[in-house]
Structure formats: structure tokens, C-alpha cells
Image: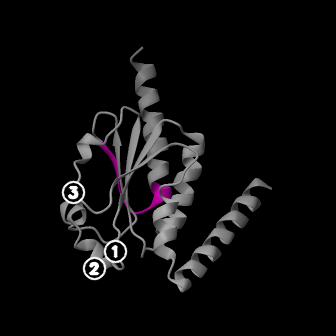
């Protein structure tokens, strides 16, 4: 039953987002979606300006840096997965870098995109750091990112148990 409700919620959100895209409001939906979470530590750290990621890493086990843009249809479904994960994992911080432009070309011209996204295919784009600044995941897929964090969690727990 839970999976069915979850799928219904996802489909309803996707339909709503498609309607927003057609009405020209997709950018507002994408930007507000990534900043509104009742589940965790989510902070917008850039609206296109340069930013030093090392200054934004928290002492939590994971800090997710999410590059998102209003023109990217993939950003809202990615957020649904991340937000659901945050509901169950309070030890994850999310730092959002919004690329507020009307299209990909405009986003790529922003200083933060010039700084970090020179050779990146598109958004959403995630960089996950552990609490000692080691990258744990780099890529575009929210599901793969969440699985990687879970696998990292298991490895760390195993190493901790072995060292005792």
C-alpha cells in the first residue's frame, strides 16, 4: 500500500510539474522545491555566485551539494527522492546551488557554473562529501547518490566495528 501511495504522489507531482512547465512557472517551482523541506538541514548557498564548497561542508556524516536549475525538468523528481531520504536520515545536510537562468546557456554563464560545472553534462548535479571533505559521490542520479551514501554508511560501520 505504501509503495502505491508513494507512486501516486510521484505521478501527481510529475503531472503538476508538467503543467507548470507549460505555464512558464517551472522555474519558480524548481527553485522553491529545493528550498522547502520540513525534513532536514537544507540551505541555499548560492544563487549563481561563486562559492567555496569547503566552507559549506558540515560536520554531519554527509553534505550533499546539489546544483539545480529552473529549466531542468529532472530537478523536481530528484528533489522528491532526496527529500524522502532526508525524512529518514537526519545526518545528511543539503547545500543547494541554484542556477537561476532561463535556459542552460544562461546557467552555464553564471560564475558558480564556470567554477564547478565546466565539464558537466547538465543538472541536477550532485557532489556528496563526508565530514572530512572526501567526495563520496559525484554525478547526476539522485537514486544512485542515495544508494552510494547507504553503502558508505555500511562500510564505515563495518570499519568501526573491526577497529574495536
Do residues under tags 3 and 1 come within 8 Å of each other at their CB atoms? no
From the viewer's perspective, is 14 left or right of 99?
Answer: right
The residue under label 3 is 50
Residue at the (59%, 51%) spot, across then down: 84
Compared with 9, 36 (above or below) is above
Q: Secondary structure at mark 1?
A: loop
Compared with 142, 129 (above or below) is above
Residue at the (25%, 41%) spot, across then down: 55
The residue under label 2 is 105
Whether the magenta-drawn stretch holds residue 139 is answered as yes
The residue under label 1 is 101
Residue at the (59%, 44%) spot, across then down: 87
State how far apart marks 2 and 1 are (Cα): 8 Å
Q: Secondary structure at mark 3?
A: loop
Q: Quadrant of the C terminus?
A: top left
Foreground mark, 2 or 1, reads 1
Count neighbours of disc 1 (C-alpha within 10 A) and say few if under 14, some if 14 to 19, many if 20 or more: some
The x and y percentages for residue 61 are 41, 34
State how far apart marks 3 and 1 are (Cα): 15 Å
Question: Magenta segment range?
Answer: 135-144
Of 49 and 68, nearer the camera is 49
Count neighbours of disc 3 (C-alpha within 10 A) and say few if under 14, some if 14 to 19, many if 20 or more: some
Q: Quadrant of the N terminus?
A: bottom right
Foreground mark, 3 or 2, reads 3
The x and y percentages for residue 4 are 76, 61
Tell which circle, 3 or 1, labels the residue nearer the N-terminal end: 3
Count neighbours of disc 2 (C-alpha within 10 A) and say few if under 14, some if 14 to 19, many if 20 or more: few
Can residue 117 be seen? Answer: no
Amino acid at each position: 500500500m505504501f509503495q502505491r501511495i508513494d507512486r501516486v504522489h510521484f505521478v501527481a507531482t510529475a503531472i503538476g510539474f508538467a503543467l507548470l512547465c507549460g505555464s512558464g512557472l517551472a522555474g519558480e517551482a524548481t527553485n522553491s522545491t529545493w528550498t522547502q523541506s520540513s525534513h532536514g538541514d537544507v540551505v541555499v548557498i548560492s544563487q549563481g555566485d561563486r562559492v567555496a564548497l569547503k566552507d559549506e561542508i558540515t560536520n554531519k556524516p554527509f553534505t550533499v551539494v546539489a546544483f539545480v536549475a529552473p529549466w531542468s525538468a529532472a530537478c523536481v523528481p530528484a528533489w522528491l527522492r532526496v527529500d524522502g531520504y532526508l525524512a529518514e536520515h537526519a545526518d545528511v545536510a543539503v547545500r543547494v546551488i541554484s542556477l537561476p537562468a532561463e535556459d542552460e546557456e544562461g546557467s552555464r554563464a553564471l560564475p558558480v557554473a564556470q567554477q564547478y560545472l565546466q565539464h558537466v553534462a547538465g543538472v541536477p548535479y550532485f557532489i556528496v562529501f563526508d565530514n572530512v571533505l572526501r567526495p563520496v559521490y559525484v554525478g547526476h542520479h539522485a537514486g544512485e547518490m542515495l544508494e552510494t551514501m547507504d553503502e558508505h554508511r555500511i562500510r564505515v560501520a563495518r570499519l568501526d566495528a573491526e577497529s574495536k
